[in-house]
Structures are given as C-alpha cells and as structure tokens.
Amino acid sequence: MLKKTLTLLACFLFGLGLLALKKPQPVKTVIIDAGHGVMAGGGYNGARGSYSYEDDICYAIAKKLVAQIKRDHPEIRIVETRPTRNITDLRERANIANREKGDLFISIHVNAMDPIRHREQVGTETEVYYTGKGKKRKKHTRKVPVYRTYTTPHPAKGTQTYIWGVNKAGQKEVAVRENAQMYSDATNGDSSNIVDVDSPEFMARAAVQTKQFWVRSAHLADFVEAEFGKVGRVSQGSYQRQVGIWVLQATAMPSVLVETGFITNKEEEDYLNSESGQQEVAECISRALGNYMEWVDKNGNRKGTTSILGTTGASAAAFLEQIEKQEQAARHGR
C-alpha cells in the first residue's frame, strides 16, 4: 500500500524538480512512557512475577530514567505520559507525545513468559474394562500409568528493544500527517504557515519522513541494546514488532519500546526490583540517548536517513529505486 502511494506521488513529483526536507531538528523533547499502571479499582494491568508487578517496575525505572537524562542531558525537555502510579489511557499516551511535539518516544516495559508445563509418570493404577456382550461379557483388569503435571518458571532472561514493523509503516505515516499542524508555525498564530496535509507535496514528505523515523528508531534500539550488553546484561537484540505496538505507530516521531528484563525469571525479577538494577537500566538508556544524538548530529540527512534528492527531469522509477535501496540498507546494514 505504501509503495503504491509512493509511486503515485513520485509521478506527480516528476515535473516538479527538487523537493527537499528540512534539516532534521535536534533532540529537544523526549517522551518517557512508563508502561501499564494501576487501574481505577486498584488492580494491576501488566505482567506479574513471583512477588511484584510490571506496572510498579516500569514506573520506578521511568522515574530514574527521567532523573538520569536530566543529569546527563540537561538541555533536553522531558515529558512523562504516566507521571503517577495510575494508568494512562493508551490513546492519551500518543496524544501527549504528539501534543508536546516530542522528538523521541521511549516506552519502558518488562517482559514475561508463561511457565513451562511438565508431565511425568508417578506410578500405575488398576483399570477395569470389559469385553464382549451379553453372556460373553467378561471383566478384565490392567495396569495403566498415572501422570502428574506441574509447571516451572520459564528461564528466559535478557533485554529486547522493539520498533514498529515495516508492515505498520502506513499507520505511522497517518500519525505523521494527522499531527502535522502541531509542528507548524500555525500553532503560534502564523496562519501563513498552515500545513496543507492534502497536498501531494506534503504527502510525499510525510511518506519519506515516516521512513526516516523508522531508520532512526532502529538506530536508537541498537544503541540501547549495545549499552545493556556493555554492563553484562543478556541482550536479545532489537526487533521489528510485526504484531503492532499501537503507541509506536501512533506517535509522529522515532519511537522504541524497551523490554528491560523478564519478571518471570526470579533472578531478573530481583534485579528489576532493586535500586541498583533500576538505576543501571536508566543509565544504559540515557547513554544510548547520548549516542543517538551524536549519530544524528554527525549524519544529519546523509547516512541512515531518507531525503528526496531529485533533479529536474529525474524519473519516478529512479525516485522509487532510491527509496527502496535506502529502506533495504536500513533493514540489513544499518
């Protein structure tokens, strides 16, 4: 669907010549999203460990992350989507991020796995059965095995950082278009700069901006996992989430979801509930943010980002080929 849209837009741009994106803005505002939260009735919404809840861990790590970013990057403005222990509606989280004109969206979560189910024979018992009918019916007995079933905690451990899957790019593009007015000067009373979101030029720009956000999200995810690895955590790597994570698709900015560990692994549950563990997670993410900002500053529109760099007479096919090559490089090379 996205490729078809790009094809139509490229045909329109065929006779327009150069259409350039503005130079990417520096990271000014970071949105910190503490996953889940305590519901109105007092119940918990997230995963449960042997003695703790994801909701509380996410909140504690998010608070430490906010404090750490303020120390490491005092120039950055931070907005929390869940500033208290109470849950924030999923749509409101995205609305907050877009309304506050975030440059990055970082969602904090805790992973979980179902227990492993086991079945073993614990003995035998006598079973009665019959054969034949009428006068020929006979009673028999035989020994049959007796089993018990039980579960043990899943041993999975480590961190994972997710970005939205490329199959969800269309939804991300919608978020970029729908929130365009928030990023225009019209919000400051300058009606001359109102964005025409229905213009072919803007639709092309939104499509390319979406790809740029995907590449930047992928780099941030890699930086986060690299920092976890440096402190000895088991990093399971960064992934595209093919099953949609709604807030990642609904925010008009680069966005990642950080799974900080497995609450269903006793060792990691203890780590995630400890002051030192929570602080270490916060420091890793803050350092990754610093690495990301350095990467953006060095690369700008040149490496890992997408721009429309056509010339008068450039073909629609060449335009699409450029986009496809950059997308493949982002997926495989980064």
Image (cartoon, rainbow, N blue to C red):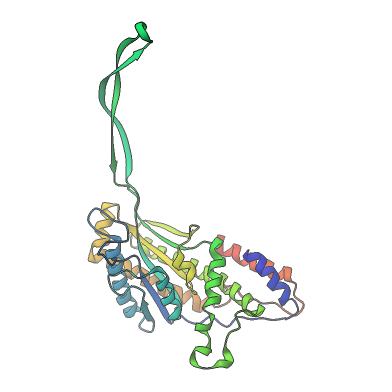
Identified at 57% across, 88% down, the residue is 194
Name the quadrant of the C terminus.
bottom right
User: From this viewpoint, which residue is outermost toward the right?
Assistant: 313
User: From this viewpoint, which residue is outermost toward the top?
Assistant: 135
Q: Quadrant of residue 237?
A: bottom left
Could you say where residue 234 lies in the image, as x and y percent from the top left?
36, 56
Identified at 40% across, 70% down, the residue is 106
* Number of numbered discs overlaid on the protein picture: 0
Relative side of 168 to 264, left or right:
right
Could you say where residue 162 lies in the image, as x and y percent from the top left?
44, 62
Residue 189 against residue 71 in the figure, above or below: below
Q: Is residue 48 visible?
A: yes
Could you say where residue 75 lies in the image, as x and y percent from the top left?
38, 84
Q: Nearer the viewer, residue 92 or 209?
A: 92
Q: Quadrant of residue 123?
A: top left
Q: Nearer the viewer, residue 249 or 285?
A: 249
Identified at 57% across, 77% down, the residue is 301
